[in-house]
Image (cartoon, helix red, strand yellow):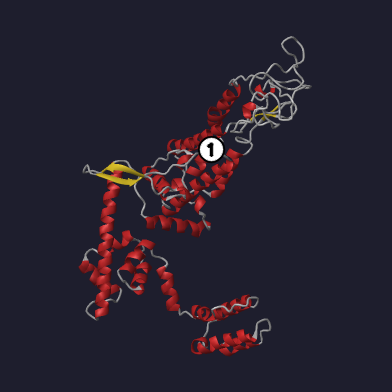
Amino acid sequence: MNLSYILCLLHFGQSIQNVLRYQLALHFFVLNVRCENLPEEGIDRILQHFEESLASPILADWTEIALDSMASPEEIALQEALKKGSSDLKFILTRNDVSNELQAGFYRNDVTSIQKFSSFFRSEDDLVRVLRAEFNTDADTSLQARAQVAAVICAWRETQTRQKRQAEVEAEMETREWTKPIPTGDYINMRNAYMKVHGRLEDKVTPSKEYLEKKLQELENGEFRAETMAEVVSKDEVDPDVMIPVFDAKGSLSVRKGASTIPLPTGPEQLRRRLSVMVNAILMLAIKHPNREEIQDVTRDLFERYKDYVLGDYVWGLSSTDLHGNQVQTPPWALVLSYEQAIRKRAYALMVTDHLQLGKALEQAWKCPTTKERHFITPLALYSKRSYPQQNWGEWNPKGKGKNGKSSSAKGKSKGKGSGTTPDGAKICFRFNQGKCSYQKCKFSHVCNRCFKKGHDALNCKEEKSPPDTTGAH
């Protein structure tokens, strides 16, 4: 298939104006020499873009499309090799004017990070010899080759200085038991490696660099810590202005970046998102360190089942009802967060004592009856038995009698403070809001005296704001 066939297809197109067909033909005429041997896949790509542009009055940039489609195999191989290098190493090599061909040569030989490049040559003499023997770059052949050798030497010296400084910082951090920083290039590579395996990752569920540093430190120490959800920080939630003063090994005062803290989750969706950040961090570490078997069985499906358990009918959705189906008791949110942390703490303990992988340990922990009884069932029972603070409900009681055995005022007003009546004037049952009313024909309204909603009493009301006063006292 050659240029003439393509021009025929364009000429007989009926859905595009004549002037656009003329412009297309002119573009291909200019590229006639290169288009004669246009590869099959290049022609398919041009025709695909042509069909997509039929409904648009704007002409696509066919010249760029054709040039991209006609890239030689050498150019394609060069671009593929350049993709293998880490962003920080490519930045250093490019800043020192190292040619793309030399960079691709390093990347093809698995020299893709600053750490490897700084240790790839034993000395400058070894660097010159390797470039001459393996990369066909001899400083004695031309001035351009000499300039390339000098560029590689400058980049190599820079990476060595950076690695030496980073090793000193990491040694000091480890001595003081501080979290060692992850180079920005490594963080970007971990994120890109995750997206290649698991797909696109949004910033709101992407673990922050500082959170990854904490989990990596725990992985290196061989013991994980069950952190609170306030420490599970995503990329969107990092506070860049958190700085703390520290003293180095020589006694000099310096400032380093501190850890960001965020409020605890206030609802199920926030907890789901924090758990997503947590599992993404573990998966990144599993890709970065495939030899660490203790985290290789963690999957997103495992954590989805864990979320369904914590936020489903067995924990957060657990409720008790009376004979009429009215909800009388639900777990408090603070207890759900505490139990969730206890599950992870139990899982990390099983990893140490029973030598289990994290995925199996986590599933065994949330199915453990002892953990649930100690950290959820018993605290929930104690919570439901605690006394509710007494309120002044006026001169009426659930039986409808006043002080002298007579009915109280029909106007629904009381002398004391508190929400004794609903906004429409109906009296609220005092015993119901204490969870004690069992009268099937109770004449008072079984609604919450705080939010005036049915289905729960004041003990289980999740409204934070107090309702407006309806007693007429103010």
Residue 197 to residue 34: above or below: above
Q: To which residue does mark 1 refer?
A: 364
Local SS, label 1: helix
CA neighbours of label 1 inside 10 A, class few (<14), some (14 to 19), many (20+) = some
Front one among 172 and 347: 172
Q: Locate the N terminus by quadrant.
A: bottom right
Which residue in the rendered view is the most extreme toward the right?
A: 441
Numbered label tally? 1
Is 429 on the left-hand or right-hand side of 178?
A: right
Residue 74 to residue 331: above or below: below
Residue 308 spot, x, y in % from top left: 60, 42
Q: Quadrant of residue 250?
A: top left
Which residue in the rendered view is the most extreme toward the top?
A: 404
Q: Quadrant of residue 316?
A: top right
Residue 163 spot, x, y in % from top left: 28, 56
Q: Is residue 111 visible?
A: no
Is 87 on the left-hand or right-hand side of 132?
A: right
Residue 105 to residue 270: above or below: below
Residue 346 spot, x, y in % from top left: 48, 35
For image coordinates 57% across by 40% down, the residue present is 267
Which residue in the rendered view is the most extreme toward the front?
A: 474
For image coordinates 53% across by 29% down, the residue present is 375
Q: Is residue 449 visible?
A: yes
Q: Amino acid at mark 1?
A: Gln
Front one among 144 and 255: 255
Residue 42 to residue 248: above or below: below
Front one among 434 and 119: 434
Q: Locate the C terminus by quadrant.
A: top right
Is 440 on the left-hand or right-hand side of 58?
A: right
Residue 466 spot, x, y in % from top left: 61, 30
